[in-house]
Amino acid sequence: MEQKFVVITDDKFSHPMSREEAIKTVKSYDHKGTTAYMVSEEEAKRIKTPDNFNKPKWS
């Protein structure tokens, strides 16, 4: 089974998608000037809402 990923922005989670699709989505948000992060589907289920996502310190 292929691992699925979710893209997180400030106010929403995307639907689960393939790694390649998630990378394209993050790049698309970046071109629009919106910060987005890619996490595994399991991690997104653990986080539950974008408010619970701890942004990496390096960003």
Image (tube, rainbow, N blue to C red):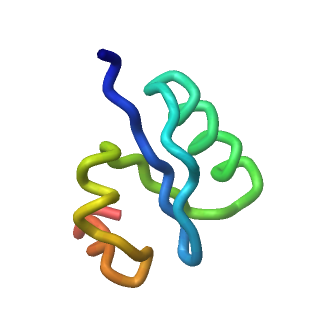
Question: Where residue 31 sits: x, y (%)?
Answer: 73, 48
Q: In the current view of this chain or complex, which residue is farthest to the right?
A: 32
What residue lies at 34% left-to-right and 45% top-to-bottom? 41
Q: Please, is residue 25 above or below residue 48 in the view? A: above
Nearer to me, 42 or 57: 42
Residue 28 in the figure: left or right of residue 2 = right
Question: Where residue 44 sits: x, y (%)?
Answer: 33, 58
Quadrant (top left/top right/bottom left/bottom right) for the C terminus: bottom left
Q: Please, is residue 8 above or below residue 38 in the view? A: below
Q: In the current view of this chain or complex, which residue is farthest to the front?
A: 1
Q: Please, is residue 40 above or below residue 24 in the view? A: below
Residue 25 in the figure: left or right of residue 57 = right
Nearer to me, 57 or 6: 6
Nearer to me, 17 or 54: 17
Question: Where residue 23 sits: x, y (%)?
Answer: 52, 33
What residue lies at 61% left-to-right and 31% top-to-bottom? 24
Nearer to me, 6 or 45: 45
Q: Quadrant of residue 56?
A: bottom left
Quadrant (top left/top right/bottom left/bottom right) for the N terminus: top left
What residue lies at 70% left-to-right and 61% top-to-bottom? 33
